[in-house]
Image (tube, coloured by chain):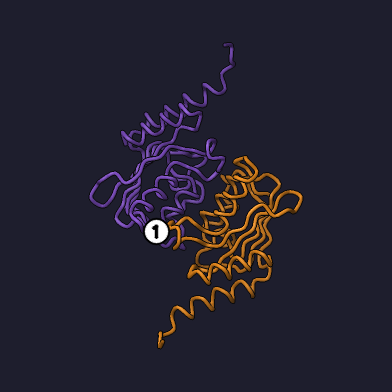
Chain colours: A purple, B orange
């Protein structure tokens, strides 16, 4: 989660919503890291965990991340959660819960759907205070009046 | 839908699950086309409609597809449906219904979720027989014994 938090902080420095993700291989080796890139890539789907999964799969040379763990600082949205099923991710560790945009413990609860073909193990709330703090700081700075 | 079906047939020729998609701009102009590329790209998220949306956004130079229509030969999965919300797609036309993997009229029904922030207009079943036929032919050919 240290590395994912680092990616989230780097994203904030780039003016992106501070979410970071890391994909670990079955042996625990780091396969890919990413921060949110929706602004820079002009791609509304360029969420940290989706980018990290795509990069990890590229690195492995397969379309599946069997046995891999995704670590992400925020509860994945429904798009990213469903992508984790497609990539056959073994385990998901996430930081802050996201009652508004989350799709794992909130909203459509992707892995609870009867039709979900692959459900990773899920551990939520890991260092949630740090992850959530980054997001709160980012959005409160954006809302603050600019006097400079 | 003609162009989306053409992309689906091209995907089949490449050994990909035959699904095709087109993104139309607010004026009806074609912004992007794509077929499924999960095998070639070694990317389990490389579904036709997600690729077409990303390409259309690149072309427009924005992260959002406001006013745009996505035409796709198969009911989108939950990942792609949720991506349509992120991209702020105005209208979705899809071909065959997908009771197993669909996420619009089946499974987690992404746009029906209370938390869904943007819901496109949805028209399903457009030339469903042709779209479904391509998929049936593809999978029955795969299951057939190879005598060659």
Residue most extreme to the top: A148
Residue at (56%, 44%) from the top-left corner? B115
- Above or below: residue A50 compared with residue B41: above
Q: Position of residue A71 (x, y in %)?
A: 35, 42
Q: Residue B25: x, y in percent?
A: 71, 50
* Image coordinates for residue B98, horizontal then vertical, percent: 55, 67
From this view, report whether residue A68 is shown above or below residue A33: below
Q: Quadrant of residue B103?
A: bottom right
Quarter holding the N terminus of chain A is: top left
In terms of secondary structure, where does tag 1 sit? Answer: loop
Q: Is residue B28 left or right of residue A88?
A: right
Q: Quadrant of the C terminus of chain A?
A: top right
- Taking the spot 58% from the left edge, 59% from the top edge, the residue there is B34
Q: Residue at x 43, y 80 (%)?
A: B143
Residue B18's image quarter? bottom right
Q: Position of residue A73 (x, y in %)?
A: 39, 37
- How many residues crowd around disc 1 within 10 Å: few (fewer than 14), some, or many (20 or more)? many
* Of the pair B14 and B90, the residue shown nearer to us: B14
Q: Which residue is mark 1?
A: A63
- What is the residue that sits farthest to the bottom in this orientation? B147
Number of numbered tags placed on the structure image: 1
The subunit letter for the residue under badge 1 reads A
Residue shown at the point (36%, 49%) measured from the top left: A56
Q: Quadrant of residue B64?
A: top right
């Amino acid at each position: 989660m240290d590395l994912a938090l680092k990616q989230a902080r780097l994203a904030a420095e780039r003016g992106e919503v501070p979410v970071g993700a890391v994909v670990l291989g079955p042996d625990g080796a780091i396969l890919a890291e990413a921060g949110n890139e929706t602004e820079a890539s002009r791609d509304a789907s360029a969420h940290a965990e989706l980018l990290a999964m795509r990069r990890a799969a590229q690195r492995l040379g397969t379309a599946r991340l069997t046995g891999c763990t995704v670590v992400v600082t925020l509860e994945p949205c429904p798009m990213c959660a469903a992508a984790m099923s497609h990539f056959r991710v073994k385990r998901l560790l996430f930081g802050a819960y996201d009652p508004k945009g989350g799709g794992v413990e909130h909203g459509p609860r992707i892995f609870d759907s009867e039709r979900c073909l692959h459900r990773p193990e899920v551990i939520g709330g890991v260092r949630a205070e740090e992850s959530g703090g980054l997001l709160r700081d980012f959005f409160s700075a954006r809302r603050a009046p600019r006097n400079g």
